[in-house]
Amino acid sequence: MAKVIDFFKNETVFSISLILAFISCFFVQPNVNYLNYINWDTILLLFAIMIIVEILKNLSIFEMVVRKLLSKISNTRQLVLVLVFACFLSSIFITNDVSLIIFVPFAILALNKVGRLDLVILTVSLQTIAANVGCMVLPIGAPHNIVMFTVSNIPFESFFLILLPYIAASLVFLAILLFLIPRESIYLPKMSEITVDTKNFLKKVLCGVDYYLLLTFITLFILIGNLENISFFNSLFRQFIIGNEVLWGVIASQVISNVPAAILLSGFSSNYEAIIVGINIGGFGTLIASMANLISYKILAKECGQFKTRYLLIFTVLNVILLIILSVTYFLLN
């Protein structure tokens, strides 16, 4: 029983989506049409991206670049700026989740080495925001955008242009906060050399893939497919969602995170541009609005448990402010 509870805690989204998909099977009898529910293009693209990400992660390419940059810093503002924008830039290519898995522990280590753990809460909060902003640049930057990219068939450049105003507003917000960090002199001791172990490289890459995330997508596709075939839910969701995609993208993301929100909304509306805006704006706000938010919190709670309550407060305040700014930006543009 303890193992089941631990599994549920570690894979909460997958566990809930599996239970809901299983329940929905009582209303729509399992049949071969279930296979048509699943957007296999999304699954295959996500798997391919995961493989590429694992290769880059095991080669430590991004960490090497950041360590090189850190060797040139001389004050606290520069240090935080490098750590934050490392998340922004890397999340464009290796997804926001993986960016934070790499750079949040790295940031805590760097701040600890210069005796500035007092900056951990703000730095990790800004790193998380930066990763969620960076993942908007390309449609391969986050799982929710991968879903929308494959479902909508919107070209790369059009996808970027849809989100450009929100990327720009978010970067201004980050720049203002970074400017408020004092420029206090620091000396960063030399860090240990990075060694790349190529032994059993292929095995490590394949074992590093998050197969539960792939299964989560499959169970969510089955759940939404069944809901579409239950007339009551079909008419109910269409009534609420169609014409209000941005609003429901934001609201749903706060409650179930933006990956399930993307699959849910795209199952009932073809206004993909509005859904893309809604789920990306919706990634800011609560701790569960984006899986990346939870990843940062878990890492910080493990490494610096004494800060987790204050972090949650500051993180939420900053995210809610940015959510309001982006919502106002949307209404001004529309």
Image (tube, grey):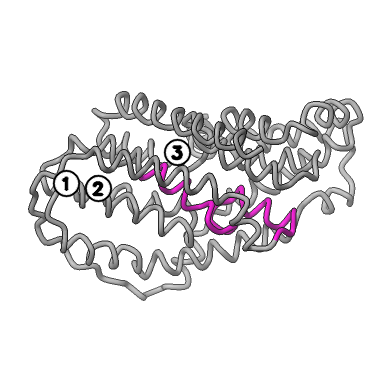
Bounds of the magenta span? 127-154
Question: Mark 3–mark 1 contact, CB under 8 Å?
Answer: no
Q: Quadrant of residue 46?
A: bottom right
Give me the residue at 78% from left, 33% from top: 243
Residue 32 sits above or below residue 301 on the image = below
Q: Secondary structure at mark 3?
A: helix
| Chain-order first, disc 3 or disc 1 | 1
Crowding at dot 2, Cα within 10 Å, few <14 / some 14-19 / many 20+, comes out as many
Between circles 3 and 1, the one closer to the viewer is 1
Secondary structure mostly seen in the magenta stretch: helix
| Residue under pointer 2 | 80
At a point 38% along the width and 36% down the height, the residue shown is 297
Q: Earlier in the sequence, mark 2 or mark 3?
A: 2
| Dot 2 and dot 1 residues touching (CB under 8 Å) | yes
> Which mark is drawn over residue 76?
1
Q: CA distance from mark 3 to mark 1?
A: 24 Å
Residue toward you, 137 or 189: 137
Look at 68% across and 56% down and name the residue there: 149
Percent across and percent down for residue 255 are 59, 27
Query: Badge 1: how crowded within 10 Å, few (<14), some, or many (20+)?
Result: some
Q: Please tell me whether residue 140 belongs to the stretch shown in magenta.
A: yes
- Residue 80 located within the stretch drawn in magenta: no
Q: Quadrant of the C terminus?
A: top right
Q: Marks 2 and 3, Cα distance to the nearest angstrom? A: 18 Å
Q: In x, y percent, where is residue 71?
A: 16, 63
Tell me the SS state at disc 1.
helix
Give the amino acid at mark 1.
Thr
Residue ID for mark 3: 293
Frontmost residue, 312 versus 1: 312
